[in-house]
Structures are given as C-alpha cells and as structure tokens.
Amino acid sequence: MNKKFLVIGNPIEHSLSPKLHNYWIKKNNLNASYDKKLLEQNEIRQLILDLREEKIHGLNVTVPFKKTVIPFLDILSDEAKNSQSVNTIYKNKDKIIGDNTDIEGFKTGLETTSQVIKNKKVLILGAGGVVPSIIIALKKMQIAKIYLSNRTKEKALEIKKNFPEIEIIEWGKTINFDIIINATSIGLGEKDEINIDYKNISQNKFFYDVIYNPNETNFLKKAKNFGAQIENGKMMFVYQAQKAFFIWHNILPVIDKETLNLLDL
Ligand code: ATR
C-alpha cells in the first residue's frame, strides 16, 4: 500500500519538506509519498478524518496551524502539550496523536554547532508559533536566562503565562545578551532589516536565525560583518524532519552531504 503523507500550512508553496521526505522515502525503498497542501482552517477537521480512515498516514503542520490543529487531536505528546504546538501527526491504535519534533530539532541542530548554550543569556525576537518550542529546548540545554521581545507585546505576555521565568523586553530595545535568536519572519524578504544595535557585537556573540531561506538574512550578514558567530535554521529544519520520519516509518534517515545539498537554494 502506498502510504500518503502531507505537510499542511498557509502559505505552503516554499516548504522544502516534500523534497526532503521523498528523498528519504526513496533512499529507504519505502512505498510512500509526501506532498504539500495549502489549507484553510475549516479544512482541518476533514483532513484529520482522512487520517482516522487511513486515507492519509501522517501530517506535518506548519504556520499558522501548529496550535489551531490541537482541538482535533485525541492525544498530545508531552512536548506538544508543553509547547501547545504540534508539527507531526499520526495514528496509533485508533487514536490521533499530535507530537512536536521542533523542540528536539532545534536542540539537536544547536548541538551540532560548537556553541555553548549552558549558562548563557539569550534574547529571542518574536512570539510566533515556534517560540515556545525554542524556549523549551533552551531550558533543556540549561540556559541561564531567556529574554523575549516582540512587536506586539500582548503576544509576548501570552507566552510568559506558560513560561513565567522569561523576561519581556520592549520591542526595539536590547540587553547584553550572549545569544540572539531571530524567530520573526523578518528576513524572508531580501530587504528586511531588524533594527538592533550592532555596535557592541563582537566575536563572542552568537546570532541564530530560524530562517534558512535566504541562507543568510541581513540579520546574520550584519552580525558576521561585526565579527559575531552565526547560524541559520537549516539544521533545525533537517532534524525536525528526521524525527518526524522516525515517528512515521520507524527508520532514522541518514543526514549526509547529499541530504543537505537538497536544501541549498
Ligand atoms: P504566527 O504568529 O502565525 O506563528 P509567525 O510567522 O511564526 O506567525 O510569527 C511572525 C512573527 O514575526 C511575530 O512575532 C511577528 O510579530 P507580531 O506578533 O507583532 O506580528 C513578527 N513580525 C513579522 N513581521 C514583523 C515586522 N515587520 N516587524 C516586527 N515583527 C514582525
């Protein structure tokens, strides 16, 4: 039987998940296919029904449905529950399960860099769907302190309700961080700029951008010019996909040079 997998989101056109999953499906000689589907919120119910009836065998979920998909699911993994964010869905013993592989994806992605996270101070920019997952991963990595700044302060305060230990910073202000993470969508556009003060930036600062397309956002480009260390979200993306693949197929697919080349844009 050909098993069907989908990534759902809106927009979805630029998702690289089909490319990556279909590559691994082929490598492992599996009888499966993985497509992308542009979705409206009112179509989620039917899609979960298709999953119950095994017309579909697994879903990846991306912006803006990671939270809104939750009411349609039977069981959440601890990680999905704690982050209130689901990116991987499957059926197990007649139950529809929502899981979150973004947390481990972010964590493993960082662990493949030479960066030390333990006891560091981090400033996160943005308060979108991926931010709770990043916070949980950083806490697992024993970060000393998390600051959060978002244009719409209410959304930052909403996140603080679940993570009271974080500190909210006004949008446009900075603090003396060790690590700064762009989790906003600023940088997807070529001319997008984040207004932060780069004058104190030096070699020992680490700039991380969740965006990996473009490869180097202006945020990372500028930081590099000032001597900082930089990393984009590519490995986070690859590892969240690897963990989803394992959940569905019980195979941990190999991440090699060829895999990474697939994602070079
Ligand atoms: P969602 O909120 O649906 O998960 P997202 O793309 O993950 O969407 O999140 C977008 C993030 O980028 C938000 O933090 C958003 O800030 P607001 O909460 O104020 O909307 C941020 N963002 C996008 N464009 C921005 C801009 N021009 N200036 C500042 N922040 C911006």
Image (cartoon, helix red, strand yellow):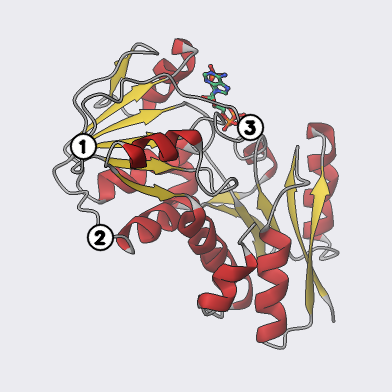
Residue type at tag 2: Ser
Residue type at tag 1: Ser
- Name the residue beneath numbered marker 3: 189
Question: Image check: 240 left or right of 171?
Answer: right
Near-viewer residue (126 or 204): 204
Coordinates of residue 59 in the picture (x, y in percent): 70, 56
What is the crowding at mark 2: few (fewer than 14 residues within 10 Å), some, or many (at least 20)? few
Residue 202: image tag: 1
- Asked if residue 210 shows in the view, the reply is yes
Coordinates of residue 184 in the picture (x, y in percent): 51, 30
Residue 114: image tag: 2
Which corner quadrant of the image does residue 88 belong to? bottom right
State yes or no: Cβ of the residue under disc 3 lies below 8 Å from any atom of ligand 1: no
Residue 51: image tag: none
Which type of secondary structure does the marked residue at label 1 adopt? loop
Which type of secondary structure does the marked residue at label 3 adopt? loop
> Disc 2 versus disc 1: distance between alpha carbons?
17 Å
Q: Compared with residue 116, is residue 152 higher up or lower down, i.e. above or below?
A: above
